[in-house]
Image (cartoon, grey):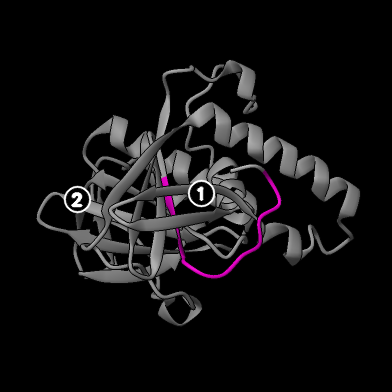
């Protein structure tokens, strides 16, 4: 083994949770680097870039032999599916230089509002239709992705959520649904996504993970 670069996820359910996260991240980028960060003595957070200028994260009960490291997502996934998945997994080589995104702070987020998960998926579906109409071989135009699709307010703070964050949430499949493909009609009306904000970041917390992005200026396209 490569010494300090090991990860242990003893619970089979948690291994499956992490494997599902990695599968979605690798679907967006087959060479996705994954940043692993220790959270206390019992948890490890796995971070991935989504291609929408938003970061995705899933936290599992695990033990990481170093505080912070970036490794290949395919290496972690192969280990989780291997015969020795319940023991310490060799993470291979460090890829710290491949990680080019600042992470949001671990503290300082406040709860702004809860929104129906079904509504966010509906926004993603509408956005996908617009992207098909106005996109190109390079994907949806940045002007579309930067449009504000949701505005929530609390604590004298107005938080704008751009379409790219909603796309990232849908692409990572963080909202539970019935069926192989996410469909707003299959999502429970009671399922919520929590909007949290820090002075320079906005975060959407869904049942299976979170997406976060730096807060910035955007124009309104959809009804908030």
Between 78 and 183, the residue placed more toward the observer is 183
**Neighbourhood count class around disc 2 (C-alpha, 10 Å): few under 14, some 14–19, many 20 upward:** some
Relative to residue 224, is residue 86 drawn left or right? left
Q: Which residue is mark 2?
A: 43
Q: Is residue 176 visible?
A: yes
Relative to residue 218, is residue 41 drawn left or right? left
* Helix, strand or loop under label 1: strand
Identified at 62% across, 61% down, the residue is 51
> Is residue 138 inside the magenta stretch?
no
Q: Which residue is mark 1?
A: 151
Relative to residue 108, is residue 161 drawn left or right? right
Identified at 39% across, 44% down, the residue is 80
Quadrant of the image occupied by residue 148: bottom right
- Which quarter of the figure is the N terminus placed in? bottom left
Magenta residues (range): 210-222
- Which quarter of the figure is the C terminus placed in? top right
* Helix, strand or loop under label 2: strand
């Amino acid at each position: 083994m490569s010494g300090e670069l090991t990860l242990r996820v003893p619970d089979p359910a948690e291994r499956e949770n992490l494997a599902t996260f990695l599968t979605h991240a690798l679907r967006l980028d087959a060479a996705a680097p994954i940043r692993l960060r220790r959270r206390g003595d019992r948890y490890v957070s796995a971070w991935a870039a989504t291609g929408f200028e938003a970061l995705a994260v899933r936290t599992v009960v695990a033990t990481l032999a170093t505080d912070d490291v970036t490794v290949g997502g395919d290496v972690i996934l192969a280990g989780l599916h291997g015969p020795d998945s319940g023991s310490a997994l060799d993470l291979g080589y460090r890829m710290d230089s491949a990680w080019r995104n600042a992470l949001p702070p671990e503290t300082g987020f406040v709860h702004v509002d809860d929104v129906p998960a079904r509504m966010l998926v509906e926004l993603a579906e509408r956005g996908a239709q617009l992207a098909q109409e106005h996109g190109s071989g390079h994907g949806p135009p940045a002007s579309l992705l930067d449009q504000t699709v949701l505005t929530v307010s609390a604590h004298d703070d107005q938080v704008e959520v751009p379409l790219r964050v909603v796309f990232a949430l849908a692409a990572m499949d963080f909202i539970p649904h019935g069926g192989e493909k996410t469909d707003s009609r299959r999502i429970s009306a009671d399922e919520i996504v929590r909007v949290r904000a820090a002075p320079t970041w906005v975060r959407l917390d869904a049942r299976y993970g979170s997406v976060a992005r730096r807060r910035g200026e955007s124009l309104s396209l959809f009804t908030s």
